[in-house]
């Protein structure tokens, strides 16, 4: 697995990564804990918590690459969801405009 990114220093389209809420949420009613998403993602976003009865969690949300949805595409039970891309795009544009005003 890849090392964690330093999200404090990372930016996306000129906006600090920590200000962009892009990562998957897990629908535990659908998740069968197959861990295909974790095996597929090279960014160390997920972790399996053995002490929580095989519960999969999003451990490193800011490691998730903005606008990537690959893990959701390989999720057979369709248990992973992402924010709406248009909403995140609007937010990024707003944050960039605010940054220019400073």
Image (cartoon, rainbow, N blue to C red):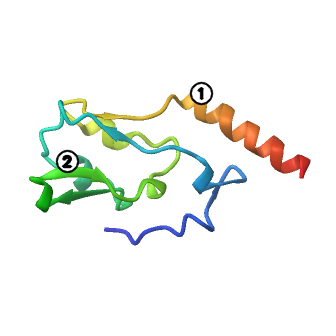
Which label number is shown at residue 36?
Answer: 2
User: In the orientation shown, which residue stands out farthest toward the left?
Assistant: 53
Residue at the image position 69 percent from the left and 49 percent from the top: 13
Which residue is drawn at the image coordinates 34% and 62% (left, top)? 44
Disc 2 element = helix
Disc 1 vs disc 2: Cβ atoms closer than 8 Å?
no
Classify the position of the N terminus by image quarter.
bottom left
Q: Position of residue 101 (x, y in %)?
A: 90, 47
Residue 93 drawn at (x, y percent): 73, 37
Measured as percent of width and height from the top left, residue 26 is found at 29, 39
Of 91 and 66, the residue lying toward us:
91
User: For the residue carrying disc 2, how many other residues have a C-alpha within 10 Å: few (<14), some (14-19), or many (20+)?
Assistant: few
Q: Residue 38 carries which label?
A: none
Viewed as shown, does residue 62 lie left or right of 15? Answer: left
User: Residue 35's x, y, as percent?
Assistant: 17, 50
Q: In this orientation, which residue lies closer to the viewer: 13 or 57?
A: 57
The residue depicted at 45 percent of the width and 43 percent of the height is 68
Q: Image point 59% across, 35% down: which residue? A: 88
Q: Is residue 72 visible?
A: yes
Question: Is 17 situated above or below 92?
Answer: below
Q: Can you say whether 40 is above or below 68 in the image?
A: below
Mark found first going from the N terminus, 1 or 2: 2
How far is mark 1 from mark 2, CA to CA? 27 Å
What residue is shown with label 1? 86
Q: In this view, does 24 lie to the left or right of 98?
A: left
């Amino acid at each position: 697995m890849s090392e964690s990114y330093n999200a404090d220093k990372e930016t996306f389209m000129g906006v600090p990564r920590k200000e962009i809420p892009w990562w998957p949420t897990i629908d535990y009613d659908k998740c069968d804990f197959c861990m295909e998403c974790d095996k597929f993602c090279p960014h160390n976003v997920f972790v399996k918590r053995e002490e929580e009865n095989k519960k999969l969690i999003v451990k490193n949300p800011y490691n998730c690459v903005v606008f990537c949805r690959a893990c959701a595409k390989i999720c057979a039970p369709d248990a992973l969801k992402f924010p709406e891309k248009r909403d995140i795009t609007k937010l990024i544009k707003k944050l960039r405009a605010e940054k220019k005003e400073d």
